[in-house]
Image (cartoon, rainbow, N blue to C red):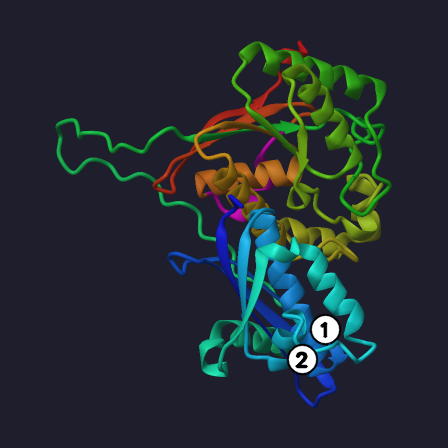
Amino acid sequence: MTGARYVVEADGGSRGNPGPAGYGAVVRDADTGQVLAEAAEYLGHTTNNVAEYRGLIAGLKAARDLDPDARVEVRMDSKLVVEQMSGRWQVKHPAMRPLAAEARDVLPAGNVTYEWIPRERNKAADRLANEAMDAGRQGRQWEPAEPAPAPPSAEPATAGPAAPADLGTPTTLVLLRHGETPLTPLKRFSGSTGSDPGLSEKGRWQAERAAEALAARGTVQAVVASPMLRTRQTAEAAARRLGLEVRIEEDLRELDFGAWEGLGFAEVMERHPADLTSWLGSADAKPTGSTESLHTLARRVARARDRIVRQYAGRTVLVVSHVSPIKTLVRLALGAPPDSVHRMELSAAALCAVQYYRDGNASLRLLNDTSHLR
C-alpha cells in the first residue's frame, strides 16, 4: 500500500438518547498530527450509537476524499463501535447493521484499523459533535470556519534585491469554465440542483476549441472536473486530446441556486427581490430555498483546491468547473472579499490559471482568456 497515513478521530452524541443528536470527525496526518479535514452534522432526533456511526462514516469519507488509497487508524471512545468494526463483537441491532456496512464500504478493509481511546483523548471530535448539536438547537446546520486566504507576499525590507526563496515548482491549476448549454445565452441560473443540462452545439464547439488550445500548450498532466454533465462533457473533450482520464471532484460542482434554478436575473428580482438583494450584499445569504451561501461554497471549493494541490504537487492540472467555483478560486488566490465574485466576468469556455507555491502563496496568471474561441 502506498497511500497516505491518516488518523480519524470520530464521535457522536445524543442529548437524551434518543434526542437531538450530532457527530464530529477529524482527519489528521498520522506523522505530524496536523488537522487535514473536519466534518460535523446535526442529525435531528436519534440515538448515541447512530450518531457515533455517522461520525465514523463521515471521518472515513473525509479521509478517502483526501486519498482513496490511504491507510487509516480510527480512534473513538465508543467501545461498541470499535469492537463491532474490528469484528470482535456482532452487530445485533438492526438499525446499526446498515451503518456498519456503509462504514466498511468506504475504504478497503485492509486499509483501516480501530483503536478505543478514553474520552479525554477524543476532545476534538467531541467538540465538533457538540457544535453540531448546538447549531441544530438554533435551527441551522454546523458550518466550519472559512479558510483564511493566503497572505500577500511581503515587500523586501531593504532597497537592494532580495535572494528569492526556493519554493520549488508551483502547482498550476488551469481553470476552464464549461462550454455553453441551452441556458447560458439566456443568462439563466443553472446550479447543482437544476436540470443538469448538457452542452449545446455551440458549447461542444467551444469545448473542442479549448481542448485544441490546451493540447497545443502541452503542459497539462491531469484533468479534474465537476460531476455536472456540462463540465464532464467539456473535460472529456480535453482529455481525449491530451490522452488523459477525467477525475471527478464533487466539491467543484456549481452553487445550489434553489428556487432560482432556470430563472433569469429579472425573473428572480421580480419573484424574490429581498432574497436576491440579500445574496448580492452578503456572502452568508443563500438563494431562495438553497442550502448554500457563498461562504459555504468557498469552504468546499477550498477543500477541493487543497486536495488537488496535494495530490498533484508541482504539476499542471486542468480543472473544469463552473462560474461560481472558478470565480471563488480566483478571489481566494487574490485574498479578495467574497462579494468580489459579483464583479468578475467569466465567459463560457474561458480559461483562468492560478499557481500555488509551497509557502501557501498563490499567483493569478490568467483570467477569462477566450482567445481560443476567436
Residue 83 seen in render: yes
Q: Nearer the viewer, residue 345 or 156?
A: 156
- The amino acid sitting under disc 2 is Arg
Q: Earlier in the sequence, mark 2 or mark 1?
A: 1
Residue 85 drawn above or below residue 72: below
Identity of the residue drawn at 23% across and 30% down: 164
Q: Amino acid under label 1?
A: Leu
Spatial distance from mark 2 to mark 1, Cα to Cα? 11 Å
Q: In which quadrant is the C terminus drawn? A: top right
The disc placed on residue 137 is 2
Q: Give me the residue at 55% from left, 24% from top.
A: 221
- Residue behind mark 1: 43
Q: Is residue 366 magenta?
A: no
In the rendered structure, which segment of residues is drawn in magenta? 336-346
Q: Are marks 2 and 1 in contact (CB under 8 Å)?
A: no
In the image, residue 40 above or below residue 369? below
- Asked if residue 251 lies left or right of residue 332, the reply is right
Residue at x-position 43% and y-position 30%: 314
The answer to whether 149 appears left or right of 231 in the picture is left
- Location of residue 154 in the rendering, given as x and y in whole percent from the top left corner: 27, 40
